[in-house]
Image: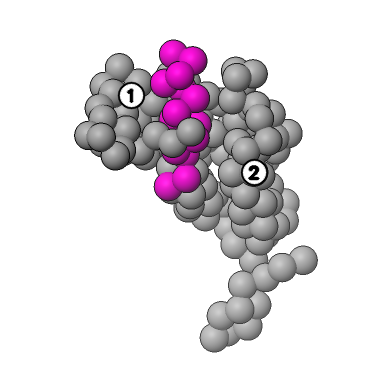
Amino acid sequence: METIDTPFGQKKLGRKYIKSFASGIAHMFACSAHHYAWLAYQHRLPTVTIDLLELQIGPAEFDIERNRVLAGMCQKSLLRNAGLLAPPGAVVSAVLSAHFGIDDYSEDGRFATIGNSVFTVVLTDDRGKDWRIDLEEGRILIDD
């Protein structure tokens, strides 16, 4: 098992760190969600949901190889971090959702953007507690 090296030796992490795992995943996804945002705008589907443990993406219009790469990166980060939890701590459910502001489309000739978008990650631990992060971004670049 992986551990964290500290000046006092190796240490496993407590459940309180699950919220920081969620935050890191939300930021990682938001920074690279350009194609998801473009699909949301093109299909007029503002919300996408990803089960990070099963790597299932819905609606089906978002479940393409290019999008599975980013979802897979988020999953790897989650699994790496969850492996640092002190037993019996575990993440038993992990859902990432993004709600894109597709009604606020703007184009300046070079770049297209959409409005306020919210990225939510909910990680549930082995005790049933939800650890939730909502990350709000004012404008998102969309890219096909």
| Secondary structure, magenta segment, majority class | helix
Horizontal relation, residue 99 to residue 77: left or right: left
Horizontal relation, residue 47 to residue 109: left or right: right
Q: Which residue is mark 1?
A: 101
Residue placed furthest toward the right: 1
x and y percentages locating residue 8 in the rendered image: 57, 84
Q: Secondary structure at mark 1?
A: strand
Range shown magenta: 31-44
Based on the picture, tell me whether residue 121 belongs to the magenta stretch.
Answer: no
Please name the amino acid that badge 1 sits on.
Answer: Gly
Q: Please tell me the numbered disc located at residue 126.
A: none
Which residue is painted at 64% across and 43% down in the image? 69
Q: Nearer the viewer, residue 19 or 68?
A: 68
Horizontal relation, residue 102 to residue 7: left or right: left
Q: Which residue is mark 2?
A: 69
The answer to which image quadrant residue 118 occupies is top left
Please name the amino acid that badge 2 sits on.
Answer: Val
Badge 2 crowding class, 10 Å Cα cut-off, few under 14, some 14 to 19, many 20 or more, is few
Which residue is painted at 66% across and 30% down in the image? 64
How many numbered discs, if any?
2
x and y percentages locating residue 85 in the rendered image: 65, 57
Which residue is painted at 53% across and 51% down in the image? 21
Residue 6's place in the image compared with 80, above or below, is below
x and y percentages locating residue 102 in the rendered image: 35, 21
Residue 50's place in the image compared with 3, above or below, is above
